[in-house]
């Protein structure tokens, strides 16, 4: 670069650096209309339980310091009924804890969900303000895990780290089936899952599907392999939730909508679905 151009360029840079290039902009956001949010998973052998809350705006204050937190979040005063095989099962309002899923619900009953993979379950809710939520679902057939195979690296005879290969069979190759794979290590809490993703049977090899891990797990530890057979509604809902979470972290992304299977006048978000899974616990041994 010739020297006669250096000083004009430096002078221009100093002017730009002295300028205030930031500017505060105020945006008037429309009022957010809170919506009912529902989650209900019908698991054979477990009681009917349902969580019914209200959504919050993305920029709305979310104060957990006062004693009114639950009252502000939970949808109270609703009449909840699930119908199945000619029988109506009312769900009572309260606080219910499921020790197997570690989740809390605010409507439930001691009546147990039957292992019925053929007949529909119908949900009917009337909210305190008169709004309604309705839905229908079935419980998909459980897909058994054929085997869990542990492998150690063959080139290290003293290696104590294993990988797990989980095999199962596609229940119906003539249609697209969706599965959720979970892999837990030493804890079954969802947040501790080493793997948690959706898959389809397009990866099946002669009707057989395998999920694997890396060589990361030491001898003596415990692992859990779980395979969910998912209704299409549940798979679409779960995938939309994941996309929505990812969109919230992207300031340039478009807001994502939740794919619900709920009808009625209340404009509710959420899912009413059957939950069907197989789970195998394995202690790693050489």
Image (cartoon, rainbow, N blue to C red):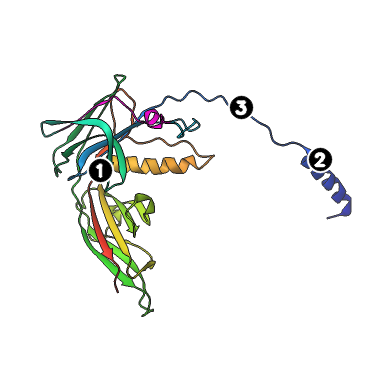
Secondary element at tag 3: loop
**Residue at x-position 49% and y-position 31%:** 61
**Residue at x-position 31% and y-position 46%:** 102
Res 72 quadrant in image: top left
Please indicate whether residue 153 sits to the left or right of residue 16 in the image. left
Q: Residue furthest left?
A: 86
Q: Residue furthest right?
A: 4
Question: Which label was assigned to residue 26?
Answer: 3
Would you say the residues marked 2 and 3 are in contact, meaning their CB atoms lie under 8 Å apart? Answer: no
Mark 1 Cα-neighbour bin, 10 Å: few <14, some 14–19, many ≥20: many
Mark 1, residue position? 231
Mark 2, residue position? 15
Span highlighted in magenta in the image: 67-83
* CA gap, disc 1 and disc 3: 44 Å
Reply yes or no: does residue 78 show up in magenta: yes
Q: Position of residue 162 (x, y in %)?
A: 35, 69
């Amino acid at each position: 670069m010739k020297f006669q151009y250096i000083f004009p360029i430096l002078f221009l840079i100093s002017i730009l650096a002295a300028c205030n290039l930031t500017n505060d902009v105020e945006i008037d956001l429309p009022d957010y209309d809170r919506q009912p949010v529902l989650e209900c998973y019908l698991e054979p052998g477990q009681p009917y339980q349902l969580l019914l809350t209200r959504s919050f705006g993305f920029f709305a204050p979310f104060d957990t310091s006062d004693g009114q937190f639950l009252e502000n979040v939970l949808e109270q005063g609703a009449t909840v009924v699930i119908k199945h095989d000619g029988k109506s099962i009312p769900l009572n309002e309260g606080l219910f804890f499921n020790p197997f899923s570690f989740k809390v619900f605010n409507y439930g009953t001691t009546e147990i969900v039957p292992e019925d993979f053929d007949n529909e379950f119908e949900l009917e809710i009337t909210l305190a303000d008169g709004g309604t939520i309705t839905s229908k679902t079935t419980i998909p057939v459980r897909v058994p895990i054929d085997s869990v195979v542990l492998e150690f690296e063959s080139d290290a005879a003293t290696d104590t780290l294993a990988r797990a290969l989980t095999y199962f069979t596609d229940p119906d190759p003539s249609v697209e089936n969706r599965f959720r794979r979970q892999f837990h290590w030493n804890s079954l809490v969802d947040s501790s899952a080493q793997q948690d993703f959706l898959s389809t049977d397009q990866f099946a090899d002669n009707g057989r599907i395998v999920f694997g891990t890396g060589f990361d797990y030491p001898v003596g530890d415990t692992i859990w392999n779980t395979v969910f057979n998912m209704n299409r509604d549940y798979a679409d809902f779960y995938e939309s939730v994941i996309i929505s979470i990812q969109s919230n972290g992207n300031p340039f992304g478009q807001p994502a909508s939740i794919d619900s299977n709920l009808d009625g006048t209340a404009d509710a978000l959420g899912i009413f679905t059957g939950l069907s899974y197989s789970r195998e616990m394995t202690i790693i041994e050489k």
